[in-house]
Structure formats: C-alpha cells, structure tokens
Image (cartoon, grey):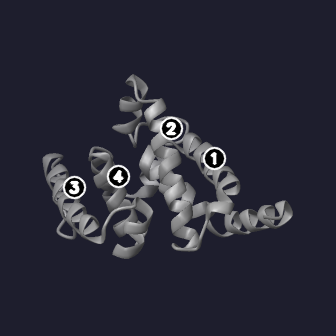
Amino acid sequence: MDEEFAKQKIQEWYDIHSDEIYRFIVMLTGDQEVAKDLMHDTFLKSYFSLQHYQGKVSVKNWLYRIARSVTIDYQRRARPVAFFLQEWNLLSVDEGNCPQKIVELGETEVHLYAALSKLKHSYKEVIVLRKLKEMSIHETAEVLDWSEAKVKTTLFRAQLALKKQLEKEGYIHENI
C-alpha cells in the first residue's frame, strides 16, 4: 500500500472520528489525559494495520475495535493498584474534572457516570456503545467482536446492574 495514501486515509479518518473515539475511551478509562494518549495510539495502530483492514466492518467500527483493544491493553499494563483507583473513580476531582465541569454535566449525568464507572468492564462497554454512542446491535457486536445475541444478553444484564447501582446510591431513574 502506498505510504502517502495510507497517511491521507488515516488523517481523513482522524478528522472524522477522533472526537468520538476520544469520548469512547474517556468513558472507559475515566481519565482525559490517558484518553488523549490512547486515542492517538488508536490512530497510530490503525496506520500500521491499514493493510489488514478488509472492509468487512465500517471504518468507524474498525476504529472503535482498535480503540477498545488499545484501552484494554493499557488497563492490563496499569492493572496493579493504580488501575483500580482510576477504574472506580471516574468522577474524582482532579485537573480534568474540576467542580465547575462536574456541575456542568448536570446532576443526572454525574449520578449516571458514577454508577456506570462501578460496573464491570464488559457492562460498561456495551452500555457506552449501545446507549451512549447509540450504535446498533450489529455495530456493537462488530466493535466488541461478540455475537449479536451476546450483545443483547449483556446489555440486558448491564442495564439491570446499572439500575441496581443507581438504586444502591439512592438515585432511581425510570428511564434506565
């Protein structure tokens, strides 16, 4: 594959999809700075893997799949104590989540993201893709490399777990 063509393609995809990929990774990691790095790693990996892209899934879903893989790899490397502290403290106040920013999110979203951050990783992924990113079951299955049946089952269980977590924290929302 022509190197110049590959650079143009990746730049085009970056321009179109980088914001979505970044937000997806932020929702998985809870860390804006890490998400920036992982988003860049995602596009770097897509550049080096471009010859393997066969068009069986959409470009967007292929990039989400790479972003998911890059994020999982990062979390595995960071797994010791730091991983657990970051994983379960999505809304901790630091430079990236100043009080003003949390207030801007709105009380409902704060509760939702706090509860979401406490779910197991597969539940968090399926809720983010299906409900927050509004991907179809088919698209979600492509990104996660799951069957459509597994997406449906996991989403059902994830929504029950999210509702239970929200209730546990004293926040009940009828739309969950």
Q: Nearer the viewer, residue 86 or 153?
A: 153
**Looking at the image, can residue 30 be seen?**
no
Mark toward the viewer: 3 or 2: 2
Query: Which residue type does callout 4 highlight?
Result: Tyr
Circle 3 — which element? helix
Q: Residue 90 placed where, x, y %?
A: 39, 42
Residue identifier under label 3? 162
Residue identifier under label 1? 41
Q: Is residue 163 shown above or below 138?
A: above
Q: In terms of sequence position, does the residue under pointer 4 or pointer 3 come before the other? A: 4
Q: In terms of sequence position, does the residue under pointer 1 or pointer 4 come before the other? A: 1
> Mark 2, residues whose alpha carbon is within 10 Å: few (<14), some, or many (≥20)?
some
Mark toward the viewer: 4 or 3: 3
Query: Which residue type does callout 1 highlight?
Result: Asp
Q: CA distance from mark 4 to mark 3?
A: 10 Å
Q: In terms of sequence position, does the residue under pointer 3 or pointer 2 come before the other? A: 2
The image quarter containing residue 112 is: bottom left
Q: Residue 86 placed where, x, y %?
A: 41, 34
Residue identifier under label 4? 113
Q: In terms of sequence position, does the residue under pointer 1 or pointer 3 come before the other? A: 1
Residue identifier under label 2? 74
Left or right of 27 in this view: 148: left
Mark toward the viewer: 1 or 3: 1
Q: Nearer the viewer, residue 98 or 28?
A: 28
Q: Residue at x 17, y 58 (%)?
A: 163
The image quarter containing residue 145 is: bottom left
